[in-house]
Image (cartoon, rainbow, N blue to C red):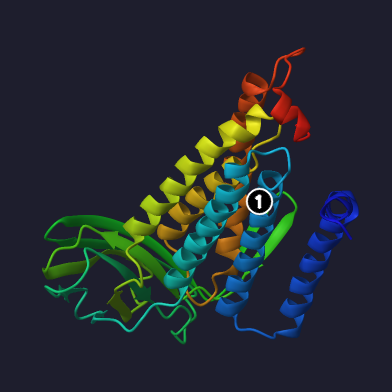
Amino acid sequence: MTRGEFSLIWHDWLRGVSLIGALLLLVAIHFLHLFSAPDYALLVVCVALLGGLGMAASVCLSSLSPLPVRVIAPLVATAGALLGFVGVFQTVYLPEPYATTTLSTTAPASTLVVPTDGLAESYLRVQGRPGASPSGKDKEVTVHLSISGLGIERKLSLEFFKSKTTSGAKGNTSLGLRDADTVLLEGLQPGVLEVAITELKPETALPMEMSLHWPLLPPSMIRMALFGVLAMAFLLSLFVARRNQFPMLLPYALVLVTTYWFVGQGIPPRQPLLPLLGIILGSGIASSGVGYGLGKGMQLLLRPRRGEELAPGRAAAGE
């Protein structure tokens, strides 16, 4: 089978069948409980990243694209996918903490020590125990935290629950356990970090454990690298749109940047699937819509004008 024949089959029916097959496989794995909740969430993220990577790269690999685009664009898309995966992975699977403390009824305020040889960025994990009280009044917990220290002043509002039912337009949705949350703290400096509970409902929902973890890679570095991917995607999209092709790489890069930003705002480590799906779908729809509009605008502005003749060398290349 030639490359042209495979491309025709892929765009005709194989792409849709592969997507449906991947979704059915994910559903089967979920009901068979083959993975833990965090592992399954990462598997879903991998499938989403690979799907986006395939769609973004397929357009760039077209024979109509200039040779530099066919070489550079898949590398840029792959780098973006790897950065996105690392960003989610290190948020869900944190290394051992370098500082811990416990807030209790008798000690609603405490301190965490940031060492001198660490990074200016750390993940703060807050662990609660919703539903631990025999009375059952603490099945849903809302806590407001104040965090202050050298170089940082932060207010957090977190919600924990043993089980919760939310109502929507199509009925009620039951949410499972959410007993912990992970939040990125930036601008940390060596010294004492003061943490305190400013509001807690119910007031008996204690103790609450807190820990600081260094990331595998600095989140600011990942964020800047993703913005670099977005900038490269924009430049490469100019060449793709010039050939009257839709630059799929641009909305793909926008989705990566937006998704990573929302992940940094905090996700529950033990049950990350639903929040991650919400982030991927929400940011995906919004960002891809913006990227689609930019891509279409590029395509309309840069495509060859009617009657414009191609150079002999380009015409011979089949453009």
State whether residue 297 is above or below residue 267: above
What residue sits right under mark 1 in the picture? 57
Is residue 237 rendered to the left or right of residue 14? left
- Where's residue 179, x and y in %? 46, 76
Q: Is residue 89 visible?
A: yes
State whether residue 45 is above or below residue 289: below
- Count every numbered label the image shows and give the total: 1
- Where's residue 76, x and y in %? 53, 52
Residue at 87% x, 49% y: name it. Answer: 8
Q: Is residue 290 visible?
A: no
* Frontmost residue, 154 versus 239: 239
- Where's residue 240, x and y in %? 64, 35
For badge 1, the amino acid type reads Ala
Dot 1: element: helix
* Frontmost residue, 249 versus 191: 249
Name, please, the residue furthest toward the top: 307
Quadrant location of the N terminus? bottom right
State whether residue 50 is above or below residue 64: below
* Frontmost residue, 237 versus 271: 237
Label 1 CA crowd tier, 10 Å (few <14, some 14–19, many 20+): many
Is residue 217 rendered to the left or right of residue 45? left
- Where's residue 101, x and y in %? 23, 81
State whether residue 268 is above or below residue 105: above
Residue at 70% x, 84% y: name it. Answer: 33
Residue at 46% x, 59% y: name it. Answer: 263
Is residue 309 rendered to the left or right of residue 250? right
